[in-house]
Amino acid sequence: MTMMQQAADEPQVSYKRVLLKISGEALMGDQGYGLHPPTVARIAQEVKSVHDLGVEICMVIGGGNIFRGLAGSAQGMERTTADYMGMLATVMNALAMQSALEALDIHTRVISAIPMDQVCEPYIRRRAVRHLEKGRVVIFAAGTGNPYFTTDTAATLRANEMTCQAIFKGTKVDGVYDKDPKKHADAKRYDKVSYDEVLQKHLGVMDASAIALARDNNLPIIVFSLDEPGGFLGILAGRGTYTLVKG
């Protein structure tokens, strides 16, 4: 194989630093609750494939597979307490993902917005940036550290603080649709949609505060299917199916 052929075969990466946002439910596999270690390992492999290209990756993982603050408050629990419980659930997921990544020899740091020094680092922006510069995967846990904010908002906040070039949101479907594709056979997928359109049509990409924060800082959001093997890598290499949310 000539040098020119080899260069042509290598993926052309368009981003240097990205944030991958996934839900806690993505770690459940086919279970109805908790963590499914083979699923966590599969997602870790997807992250490794992109990390191997030299892309700096940080992550935010939701906690809905263990506890969802909004659901807890709906059942009569005080909202602030329920939200803090949800934040602790995200730390458990982050530690599981760290373990899976380190099993693949990817140096990983869990950084929590709620200090818990025995299990992870406290959030210090400059330290987090330095970890990324050194090629470590950084997993941001415990949301923003404040109740009433979702992990979507935490992801957008951290992506801005880390000067990421895009947020990759891994979901169960391959993009943003005008209606639920699992319920409607005629649902249409958007190739590209504006922040304002997402808000006006309630397209459910992320909550409104997360979308507004991304819009105000011109941060693109790429919505893709995490269930499709190689999907994360494919988009970075300029192929694959996804929806781009941009101004």
Image (cartoon, grey):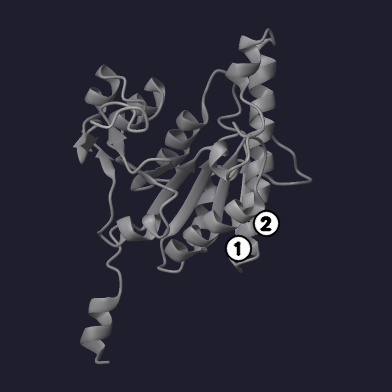
Q: Is residue 175 placed above or below 6 in the rendered structure?
A: above
Q: Nearer the viewer, residue 28 or 110?
A: 28
Q: Is residue 84 left or right of residue 246?
A: right
Q: Is residue 3 left or right of residue 134?
A: left
Measure the alpha-carbon separation of dots 1 and 2: 10 Å
Q: Is residue 57 placed above or below 12 in the rendered structure?
A: above
Residue 67 seen in render = yes
Q: Residue furthest right?
A: 118
How many numbered markers are drawn? 2
Q: Residue furthest bottom?
A: 1
Which secondary structure lies at badge 1? loop
Residue that carries the numbered disc 2 in the rendered image: 99
Amino acid type, residue under disc 1 in the picture? His
Q: Is residue 215 placed above or below 125 in the rendered structure?
A: above
Mark 2 surroundings within 10 Å by alpha-carbon count, few (fewer than 14), some (14 through 19), many (20 or more): some
Residue 235, image quadrant: bottom left
Task: Assign the N terminus to one quadrant of the image.
Answer: bottom left
Q: Position of residue 30 (x, y in %)?
A: 58, 43
Which of the marked residues, 1 or 2, is nearer the chain's N terminus? 2
Q: Mark number for residue 107?
A: 1
